[in-house]
Image (cartoon, helix red, strand yellow):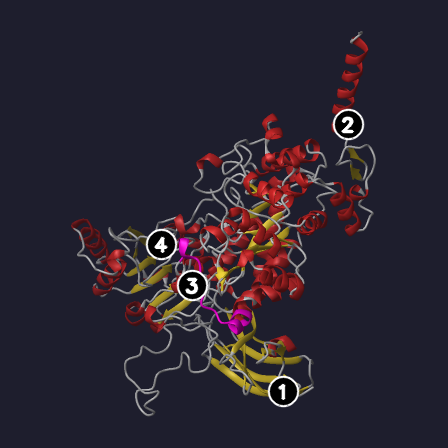
Amino acid sequence: MNRKPLLLALGCLLATTAHAQKNLYHKGWVDFNKNGRRDVYEDVMQPLEKRVDDLLAQMTLDEKTCQMATLYGFGRVLKDEMPTPGWKNEVWKDGIANIDEELNGVRNTPKAASKYTYPFSQHAVGINNVQRWFVEETRLGIPVDFTNEGIHGLNHDRATPLPAPIGIGSSWDKALVRRAGETVGREAKALGYTNVYVPILDPARDPRWGRVVECYGEDPFLIAELGKQMVLGVQGQGVAATLKHFAVYSVPKGGRDGNARTDPHVAPRELHQLFLYPFRRVIQEAHPLGVMSSYNDWDGVPITGSHYFLTELLRQQYGFDGYVVSDSRAVEFISEKHHVAPDFLDGTRQAVEAGLNVWTNFYTPATYINNVRELVKTGRLAQATVDARVREVLRVKFRLGLFDQPYVPDPRQADKTVHTPADEAFALQANRESLVLLKNENARLPLQKSQLKNLLVVGPLADNPDPAISRYGPSNNPVTTVLKGLQAAAGPGLTVQYAKGCDVVCPGWPDTELVPTPLSAPEQQGIAEAVAKAQAADVIVAVLGEDDKTVGESLSRTSLELPGRQQQLLEALHATGKPVVLVLINGQPLTINWAARQVPAILEAWFPGPSGGTAIAEALFGNYNPGGKLPMTFPKSTGQIEFNFPFKPASQADQPIGGDPNGGGKTATNGPLYPFGFGLSYTTFAYSNLQITPREAAPKAPIEIAVDVANTGPVKGDEVVQLYLRDKLSTVITYDSQLRGFERVSLAPGEKKTIHFTLRPDDLALLDRNMNWVVEPGEFEVLVGSSSTDIRAKQTFVSKAE
């Protein structure tokens, strides 16, 4: 047999195949399936659903199941920076739904360090290389959705850093949050990420919970308004936004985090009015392309295994049309934690049937993918169900334009568009607007530099950069601590000294909060050294609070006092008789009762971004007038918890000391330390001329509200004008009042502006006794003011019956 012609023919075939691999790219289309013709799914002119249908029809079960899982990026699950021949032996040889945190230089993960994280253009090149492998080396060439975190700014090496979400929530500034979203989306697009996990829409109703720092606050309306702007900002840049964490994630029993994230005590009506409200609003008004399912349960059913949550509510009622990705290990928890499935295989079935599209965890996706394949092959999971889940993933990829342009067109542009000088200026402004002035007795602030010679900065957070850098945000940005910020702003003639005083926590903490221990000799010495330096100071700035090891994900507290020896340090500084200004660096409300009574000035800074020290120094020296408002209630004691806004009538009212024996008593601690919406200013504001039009509203008619606000003080300042609504009489108990509008307005001294609000039927609606959303006829009271308790103007209107 003459083998020469056969070998020649085989060689020609291989050469032709290799040539075809390199010639997939045609003017206006890509030959993803490498068949030499333009299929419907490759044709940008075809309707989206036809393109999805065509691609789905060509897919094998193996290819479909690969579109149902996440692959964690380099240094997490992926071992290779760039594709290798070995990838042909991995499960993703048939594609993958998304790759998370690919080459992003995630914080505190040395094995994820890569030459492809920075410069920014190099990352775009790296992402293109990985994407090219999936386009060119898999049979159908389905592009990858590159996902990443983004709640503190994009989670990428040296991207633009933002304050913690609790600080962003304190800005009450919709335009600022919209720009934050645009910044995150623009940088993601330039770097090659196509989907950002942002925002967190969980109402943080229990301040003991560790992830309070990563939420916008406790009120569903505030969260919905800010979350909507974040999504619009991100998706306006052509990048998907994925909401976290659906649903009822933020109130595990007792506020306990870590492995105890379960058993939220939430009644059905409260579920919809508080915890689902932000998701419903943002989905219906901003149309995010992604939702992350949470790993907790509600009323005994795991969310990730709940058809009610993932299909009936999310898709059928809210109209969500993106894809649902699980939080890490949420599917495994169906069997491991919740014990409602005998094993991971059945947990997989429950999740897919419930409506989950994409599984995520920090190990190879092969186990989950093989679970789905086995379930289909054995008849335990319908092929049609898998097709429906994959269709929703593919639809998002088409809508993102991945089948039209799968690559970053010009990687070099990333160096010009990521973390620009304008972005840095914006990050500083975000830090400024996050500041909340809690106390300013006798106008102690701002400090007058001309009257000071020596300023002492004290505390374990004064020169600690860690709270400014989040695992969910950019890393490797230089941090200006409070100490550095004050030193830079001091100018000639003012000496800024520093003493640490103590650590954030003490040995044995947090058990020392249960059984106090005496200070050790080194601790006594640290406080004594701070006190000695304080003797020569004109003013003491104490920077106290929490760090990223005491509050955050998988961290929760049983006390909200200043941790460690910080209270002893503060009292010792106060005992010197020198004026003390307290700057709080913290991720959750703290029960600072002693400070609220004894310290003349308190500035809440939360966990600021890397430029936070500059913003704090500006505020302390009067170059910036803080205008933020609290997005959470500060309780006086953990014994008051739950203590939050909104609340049902009389549930948080002062307990009378006499009178009705069913209500009188002297043992309760009454009222908040600082109420929801609270924040002071270096100036004053006056409200006048509240107008409601019409005063009798037809059903479903909008109601226009206007109020004049004037700066009546000596300096420029920001006021957050807050509108609350009270239903005077209803068929079910409603909240005492509910936030239904807010605007942050900047006013020069003597300047007056008219602030406008529009109330729509949804703002008046309640869940009636049959659990239907309705607007009941009757009288409503509009309350406008500077906080939930500082109401400056009231008027009523009537909603007429149908």
Please say whether residue 260 is one of the residues in the magenta stretch.
yes
Q: Give the mark count.
A: 4
Asked whether residue 558 appears in the rendered view, the answer is: yes
Tell me which residue sits at (59%, 54%) in the image.
Answer: 242
Name the amino acid, label 3: Gly
The nearer-to-camera label among 2 and 4 is 2
Which of the two discs, 3 and 1, labels the residue nearer the N terminus? Answer: 3
The span from disc 2 to disc 4 (Cα, nearest Å) is: 56 Å
> Neighbour class for label 1 at 10 Å: few (<14), some, many (≥20)?
some
Q: Nearer the viewer, residue 601 or 250?
A: 250
The span from disc 1 to disc 4 (Cα, nearest Å) is: 48 Å
CB contact under 8 Å: marks 1 and 2? no
Which of the two discs, 1 and 4, labels the residue nearer the N terminus? Answer: 4
Q: Which element is circle 4 on?
A: loop
Left/right of residue 665 with respect to residue 54 in the rendered view: left
Which of the two discs, 3 and 4, labels the residue nearer the N terminus? Answer: 4
Q: Nearer the viewer, residue 168 or 112?
A: 112
Q: Which residue is mark 4?
A: 550
Q: Which residue is mark 3?
A: 622
The span from disc 3 to disc 4 (Cα, nearest Å) is: 31 Å
Name the amino acid, label 1: Pro
Extreme-front residue of the structure = 378
The span from disc 3 to disc 1 (Cα, nearest Å) is: 49 Å
Q: Which residue is mark 2?
A: 20
Can you tell which mark lies on residue 777? 1
CB contact under 8 Å: marks 3 and 2? no
Magenta range:
257-273
The span from disc 1 to disc 2 (Cα, nearest Å) is: 69 Å
CB contact under 8 Å: marks 3 and 4? no
